[in-house]
């Protein structure tokens, strides 16, 4: 479990960095396209040195489609409201859906301490997001964030199953980035037209950096799911909200009030309960 915990905390820190840099991009959907494409290009040479992900092709196809929808909903939420409002809601509701799915579909047990930990983490991140003023834009953004959380829960369950279905976990992890990159390359121009390609050319250097970081954050998470309980690790990954909020305060100059500090405390308590569980 130490390996899984280390991997998921690494994933959380890097995930916050990726999302804060995506928020700062002029065209956020174009940046998500670049992340997907460059991630695929970077890992492609390694495919010659690993076995094929036999038995996991359906998982790869399914997760690529869900991730493409996730990218769209995530960007819509970023474009509609403050990062420190929508990011916590999206990430906080994801583990809720994951925990329900893990119990119903993966047959994973739910010890009391882990359930309490998941509740504290999810409640904390959702409270942090809902602490913003309920403006029209914020409500719209929170709606997109909630839908994003649902896709997070779905792809987490799919990827946890996929990475456990292959003999070599790196087979699934590396092929995931290729499948995801191909899917967003097809769907993004279909949704936004040629303009997304034009916008992507302007920020390709940042796209390369974020592609590398994306491999680190989600690759670490998928490897962690190989070694530990899905719901517990998914909730631990959402401690990224703490790092993301800190970055939002420093670099985006977003305000942190008492309710958000209280919510951050709830996340910390949840993380401790999850570790104890």
Image (tube, rainbow, N blue to C red):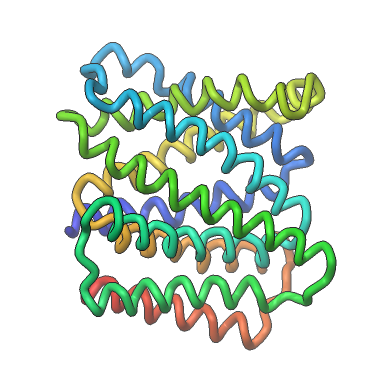
| Above or below, comparing residue 137 to residue 214 in the picture | below
Depth check: give the residue in front, 252 or 169: 169
Residue 276, quarter of the rendered image: bottom left
Depth check: give the residue in front, 24 or 165: 165
- In the picture, measured across the screen, residue 161 lies left or right of residue 122, that is left
Quadrant containing the N terminus is bottom left
x 42%, y 26%: residue: 61
- In the picture, measured across the screen, residue 158 lies left or right of residue 190, that is left
Residue 160, quarter of the rendered image: top left
x 43%, y 56%: residue: 12
| Above or below, comparing residue 209 to residue 79 in the picture | above
Furthest residue toward top: 48
x 56%, y 47%: residue: 18
- In the picture, measured across the screen, residue 76 lies left or right of residue 32, that is right
x 37%, y 71%: residue: 118
Where in the figure is residue 99, as x and y percent of width and height?
35, 62
How many numbered marks are there?
Answer: 0
Residue 226, quarter of the rendered image: top left
Where in the figure is residue 125, as x and y percent of width and height?
53, 71
Furthest residue toward front: 104
Quadrant containing the C terminus is bottom left
Where in the figure is residue 179, as x and y percent of width and height?
45, 23
| Above or below, comparing residue 225 to residue 182 in the picture | below
């Amino acid at each position: 479990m130490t390996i899984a915990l280390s991997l998921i905390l690494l994933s959380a820190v890097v995930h916050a960095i990726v999302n804060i840099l995506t928020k700062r991009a002029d065209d956020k959907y174009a940046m998500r396209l670049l992340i997907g494409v460059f991630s695929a290009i970077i890992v492609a040479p390694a495919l010659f040195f690993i076995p094929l992900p036999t038995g996991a092709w359906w998982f790869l196809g399914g997760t690529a489609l869900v991730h493409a929808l996730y990218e769209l909903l995530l960007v819509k939420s970023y474009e509609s409201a403050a990062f420190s409002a929508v990011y916590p809601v999206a990430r906080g509701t994801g583990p809720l859906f994951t925990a329900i799915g893990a119990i119903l579909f993966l047959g994973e047990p739910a010890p009391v301490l882990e359930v309490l930990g998941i509740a504290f983490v999810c409640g904390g991140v959702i409270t942090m997001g809902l602490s913003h003023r309920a403006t029209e834009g914020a409500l719209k953004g929170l709606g997109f964030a909630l839908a994003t959380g649902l896709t997070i829960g779905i792809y987490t369950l799919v990827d946890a199953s996929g990475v456990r279905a292959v003999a070599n976990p790196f087979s699934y992890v590396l092929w995931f980035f290729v499948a995801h990159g191909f899917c967003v390359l097809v769907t993004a121009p279909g949704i936004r037209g040629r303009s997304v390609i034009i916008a992507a050319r302007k920020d390709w250097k940042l796209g390369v950096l974020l592609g590398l970081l994306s491999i680190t954050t989600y690759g670490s998470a998928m490897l962690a799911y190989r070694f530990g309980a899905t719901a517990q690790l998914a909730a631990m990954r959402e401690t990224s909200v703490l790092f993301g909020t800190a970055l939002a305060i420093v670099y985006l100059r977003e305000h942190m009030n008492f309710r958000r500090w209280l919510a951050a405390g709830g996340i910390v308590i949840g993380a401790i309960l999850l570790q104890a569980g």
